[in-house]
Amino acid sequence: MKGFDSIAASMFPGEWNIIKEREGDSEASTILLEHSDFIFSRFPEQSFLLDRFPKRIADHTKFASLALSFGEVEDNPVLRSRYINEEQKFIRVFQLLWAYDNVWVETSLRYENTERIKEVLQNQEKEKRMFTALEKLIQNDSDHLQIEELADLEVFLELGLRETVSSVFVFEKMQVCIWSNFDLNMPMFIGNSESLEILRTIITTEGLYLRR
């Protein structure tokens, strides 16, 4: 079985190697997680945004009225419910991608506030899954692991969408990397153009958009 380093390196076309490119970044501890901007500038034609909107909203006032940030809605039951309804669209997309591929996650979990994680999840089973993953990362002195169970993927995704734990999700065979972000959108790199059709089908069917 391939290790995460070789899988990450295989995401990109030609001889370009993210492992070698990041060697000059002495402050970065991760391979992909901290390098999304660098990757998107290097491969703009293969970089996309998984979003609730089909194109960028130029009017900032209108965008602000539609934007959903978890930190701003979590204490309002009505807005929180609206947020979770939108969040479920992303979860359904990831459920299908998980069904078709091997999934890895590179994550900031080791460095995040565990009490904040509990506040955000508010679910003992989900907390247990996250702390089991945390133990594995600490034991291996690593920031990445392969996701075998769908429930684990969903918890990492929830924490990413809720702006609590940053993660990048790597779908090995599709050669797709998806970064957690804010305002319910996720930057995406697609290394294999043959994956684009099924990605668009899944994403639009679940009520989201793949855009530049």
Image (spheres, helix red, strand yellow):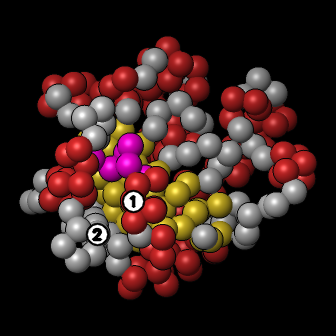
Up the image or down, 105 lies above or below 45; here it is above
Residue type marked 1:
Ile
**Residue 148 x, y percent position in the rendering:** 28, 51
Say which quarter of the image contains residue 110. Answer: top left
Q: Main secondary structure of the magenta part?
A: loop
**Residue 34 x, y percent position in the rendering:** 38, 43
Residue type marked 2:
Phe
Is any part of residue 149 visible from this angle? no
Q: Describe residue 105's horizontal placement relative to residue 94 as left or right.
A: left
Q: Name the residue under label 1.
A: 39
Quadrant holding the N terminus: bottom left
Give the class, few, some or many, for how many residues have Cα within 10 Å of label 1's Cα (few <14, many ≥20).
some
Residue at the outermost top position: 115
Residues at discs 1 and 2 in contact (Cβ within 8 Å): yes
Up the image or down, 110 lies above or below 25; here it is above
Q: Mark 2 points at which residue?
A: 12
Q: Is residue 74 magenta?
A: no
Up the image or down, 49 lies above or below 114; here it is below
Residue found at x 38% / y 49%: 35
Q: Does the magenta stretch include residue 34?
A: yes
Q: What stretch is highlighted in magenta?
A: 31-36
